[in-house]
Amino acid sequence: MLLALALLATPARYGGQLSVLAPASALDGSRIEPGSAHSPLELALARMLCEPLYRVAANGELAPDLAALPRSEGPRLLSMRLRAGTGATEVVASLGKLAAAESPYRALLLPLSAALSPRGEGELTASFAFPYPDWSLGLAQVGACPSKRSGPFTVLGKFAPPQLHLTANLDCAAGRPFADTLVLRSASPRSAARALASGEGDLALLPLPEPAQELNGPLSVATYLAVNPRKPQLAPVATALAARLDRAELVRIFVRGPAQPLYGLLAPSVEPHPLAAPPRVEFARSGHLGGELLVDASGDVRAVAERLQVKLHDLGIDLRVVALPRAELSKRIGAGDYDAALVAIPALPEPGLNLAQVLLLAEPEAQVKTELAAIGALPDRAARRERASARARELLGQIPVVPLYAQGLAVSVRPGVHGLSFDGAGLPDLGAVWTEGAR
């Protein structure tokens, strides 16, 4: 008991080196870009280097970061004053990139009537096509970070596997990180477990065989099977899979944790009323169907895709699995040039915007804006959350999108490492981590 009290009284210490273990793919610099991050790991890596405009606090409320809390100048105009050193022109240009058809964060810009506008270099204004009071919560998503490297750490030199060295950013808006340097090292689950046990590593950003101290983040990235709505002849693909797939089995055997089956359209991190597994029903075959099932070649979804391929084949549907580079996959989905695809969506941390992310896979942009306008018109936040959840339940099965599973991030630490926690958007802030004995 006395030892526990002593540890609780130990003050946080600045200095030292933080050794972070991650899969080899983490050292690919192209995967640490906020606007193209798709997986929990990619989001966490981007968070090391980039600070968002806002945070979602533990109580679900908006908290300032690179920008002060927004000021309403009417139902359709917000102004946001930026922290010193953050340029309005740069923020506008960075967020403007999210409007691309292939962006997983395009839904964030749908309520706006025009692009964000700089008001001088220290302030932004957002004009809305319809009122959407919870819009600023979406800016807490790492994918909406400004391109400027404003996070707790900055890169030292070039990306050079098998190690990536980062140094403390003394100008970080949230305050300088505790560690002076962060070394990102490539590791397998077993080698990471050994490194933590021996003290050669401090944190591991991957599930371990027998984690000693593991903290799992919110399940904020959801994966869906999307069937091209422009090809109505393929609609039975979604119907058949939703009717017969055992998602619990799929996750248990083919998905790396932490993960859970997903039965609703919203990610568990924002869904107020998660759905239980529906009863499996018979599917009446309607002749032979075929096509391509596109997947991200850089992700860990090939085994999932092949399992779906087998299940669909048993139902008389033959989809050939085609693995594409991330950029090409995103462009083909954005252009509607696909039959079916596995799509990972990092949830914007607000139910209505997350619903819009999913609906853009199946409905015209104008229709999705109509859904958002109906949500935003309600008088209080609780009512807006309920509306988004209810519409997600109503639209499930009506659109050719099948929710499959949701994932979070597993972080393991060795004894003597403190300060690790996840924010409301589901990401760890490694700038807050400190180690005993640091100097």
Image (spheres, rainbow, N blue to C red):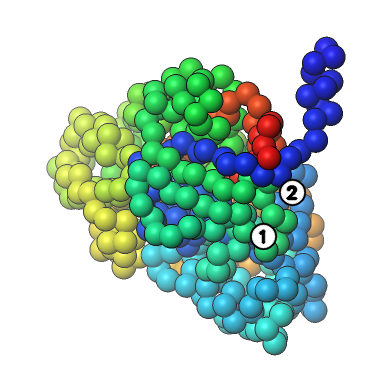
- Local SS, label 1: loop
Q: Residue at x 71, y 44 (%)?
A: 14
- Does residue 85 appear left or right of residue 156 in this picture? right
Residue 92 image offset from top left, x and y in percent: 58, 77
Three-letter amino acid code at disc 2?
Answer: Ala
Q: Work out whether residue 403 or residue 378 is closer to the camera in this orientation and state it.
A: 403
At x 63%, y 23%, the residue is 415
Q: Quadrant of the N terminus?
A: top right
Cα gap from disc 2 to disc 1, whole angstroms: 23 Å
Residue 3, position in %: x, y?
80, 16
The residue tagged 1 is 170
For badge 1, the amino acid type reads Leu
Task: Tell me the tag on residue 57.
Answer: 2
Instruction: Determine whether 72 is above or below 20 in the image.
Output: below
- SS class of the residue under badge 2? loop
Q: Earlier in the sequence, mark 2 or mark 1?
A: 2
Q: Is residue 79 visible?
A: yes
**Residue 84 in the image: above or below residue 15:** below
Is the residue marked by circle 2 packed among few (<14), some (14-19), or many (20+) residues within 10 Å? Answer: some
